[in-house]
Amino acid sequence: QRADTAYQWIAPTATQPVQRLTETYAEETTATEKAVTSDYTETRWYAPPGLVAETWGEAAGSNTRWSTVPGSGIVTTATFTFHDDGASEYDSKSAAGELPVLARAADDVPQYKTVPLVLTATADSSNAAVEPRIETVWGAEDMDDLTTVARRTFRDAQSPSVTILHRAMPLLQLYDVVTVTDPTRALDTAKGYVASIRLLLDSSTTGRLNQETVVVFPLSQFDPEAA
């Protein structure tokens, strides 16, 4: 998928709007369908100098999707058009033909291909069962990447943790590796990582800044490096 153009047509001033034209093209291929999609959007908004928030805006554009079943020779063209006054139109028709070939960028402009991957993972743990959760992982390049993310998710959710209240420690950061010794919790130099930090201000008496730190002791069976 590639964003083809995106630029400002008129410089923002107190009396003129800003216009952005965006074109996006995409290709999809599955075992049962091949498709090409073209998106065109024109947006305008008015923002007085010195203000970040827009005062009004409008948009118009269209989305066209050509799809075919491999080997059928029939292409279905579906077009959705929306206007800046809020009106919209939809049209769909099928005819013999081939999918359009998208224009390619120059060699120095990167091209991107998106392939959906699905991983179903189950954690073997003595903790209480939880409802299945669906998560989209952007940027994963293969099943190994998805497996690593799943193991990290299980590590955070299933590993034992403790919440410690102490004086504020400004240099302590998330995911720092720490050692905890607490006889009341049967912890003897237990090594873990900082999962969350919450600052607590005692504004009623001393004005002292305290800190609530959650430390997770990762279980070895969920080690992402062992995936």
Image (cartoon, grey):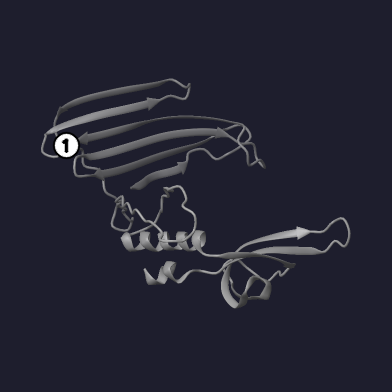
Q: Position of residue 159 (x, y in %)?
A: 51, 64
Q: Residue at x 43, y 38 (%)?
A: 21
Farthest residue to the bottom: give it: 189
Q: Would you place residue 123 above or below residue 24 in this image?
A: below
Nearest to the observer: residue 206 or residue 21: 206
Left or right, 155 with respect to 69, comes to right
Residue at x-position 58% and y-position 65%: 161
* Structural crowding at the residue carrying mark 1, measured as other residues with C-alpha within 10 Å and reported as few (<14), some (14–19) or many (≥20): some
Front residue (pair 187, 43) = 187
Residue drawn where x is 58% and y is 76% of the image = 190
The spot of residue 150 in percent (x, y) is 41, 59
The image quadrant where one finds the C terminus is bottom left
- Give the left or right position of residue 226, taking residue 101 as reference: right
Where does the image place residue 56, in percent across and percent down from the top left? Answer: 58, 30
Q: Is residue 210 visible?
A: yes
Residue 142 seen by the camera: no
The residue at the point 20 percent across, 39 percent down is: 33
- In this view of the protein, which residue sits in the foreground, 212 or 138? 212
Count of picture labels: 1
What amino acid type is highlighted by mark number 1? Val
| Residue behind mark 1 | 69
Depth check, front residue: 87 or 106: 87
Q: Identify the element where label 1 is drawn.
A: loop
The image shows residue 17, relative to residue 135, as above or below, that is above
Q: Splitting the image into 4 quarters, where does residue 96 fall?
A: top left
Q: Is residue 61 left or right of residue 195?
A: left
Q: Position of residue 16 (x, y in %)?
A: 57, 32
